[in-house]
Image (cartoon, helix red, strand yellow):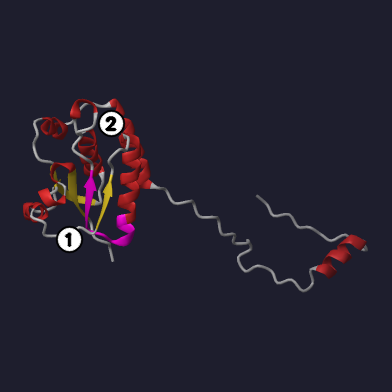
Amino acid sequence: MKKRDHKPVANAPDADLFRESVSDVTPLRHGKAMVERPRPRPVPVQKLLDEHAVLRESLGQQTAWEIGLDTGEELSFLRDSISTQTLRKLRRGHWVIQDEIDLHGSTSVEARELLAQFLAHCARRGLRCVRIVHGKGLRSKNREPVLKRKVAGWLMQRDDVLAFCQARRPDGGGGAAIVLLKGKSR
């Protein structure tokens, strides 16, 4: 593309007025104005993962870990990269429980949202060990611990959960889980 030469029109009052108005302007070095574009809004990745998990859960079948809970086995989980010694310490109460949430009386949808908010709060505060009271299901339909299964599934899907196990009797027993969270990155 050829650059066209524009010749000023002689004795044009508009051209003179224009030259006079831009006489003290300094030309740009790069020839173009550098405009900073607005940055995109942050993506709430964990919230999106939680929402997708709810959809999968509503459409899916029971997973192998859920089937084990039907037999009355103790609730526990350990991420692959974590030693079994960590789970043993968690079961024995090695870490101080720094905070807790009680999900009694919540519907599954409410409990999932409350749990996600609670874990986000714990991450912001840098908490490592928390208790989640899900109840034993004594007042639910068929006296089944519905939230116990669901809480276990939700916790396993989160990258910030390293391990969890059923609480010791003084800490809630079969109606609560003790959760070990990732520490704050420095």
User: Foreground: 72 or 180?
Assistant: 72
x, y (%) of residue 19?
83, 67
Crowding around mark 1 (Cα neighbors within 10 Å: few <14, some 14 to 19, many 20+) is: few
User: Foreground: 79 or 163?
Assistant: 163
Q: Residue at x 34, y 55 (%)?
A: 121
In the rendered view, does 35 fall on the left or right side of 106? right
User: Which label sits on residue 96?
Assistant: 1
SS at mark 1 in the image: loop
Residue 120 among magenta residues:
no
x, y (%) of residue 3?
69, 55
Using the image, determine if residue 156 lies above or below residue 12: above
Using the image, determine if residue 107 lies above or below residue 28: above
Check disc 1 and give the amino acid type: Val
x, y (%) of residue 167?
14, 48
In the rendered view, does 51 fall on the left or right side of 149? right
Residue 133 can be seen, yes or no: yes
Residue 123 among magenta residues:
yes
Q: Residue at x 68, y 52 (%)?
A: 2
First in sequence, mark 2 or 1: give its number: 2
User: Foreground: 3 or 41?
Assistant: 41
Q: Nearer the viewer, mark 2 or mark 1?
A: 1
From mark 2 to mark 1, how far is it between C-alphas?
32 Å
User: Foreground: 62 or 129?
Assistant: 129
x, y (%) of residue 103?
28, 43
Residue designated by label 2:
57
Numbered label tally: 2
The residue segment tinted magenta is 122-133
Image quarter where the C terminus lies is bottom left
The answer to which image quadrant residue 51 occupies is top left
The answer to which image quadrant residue 112 occupies is top left
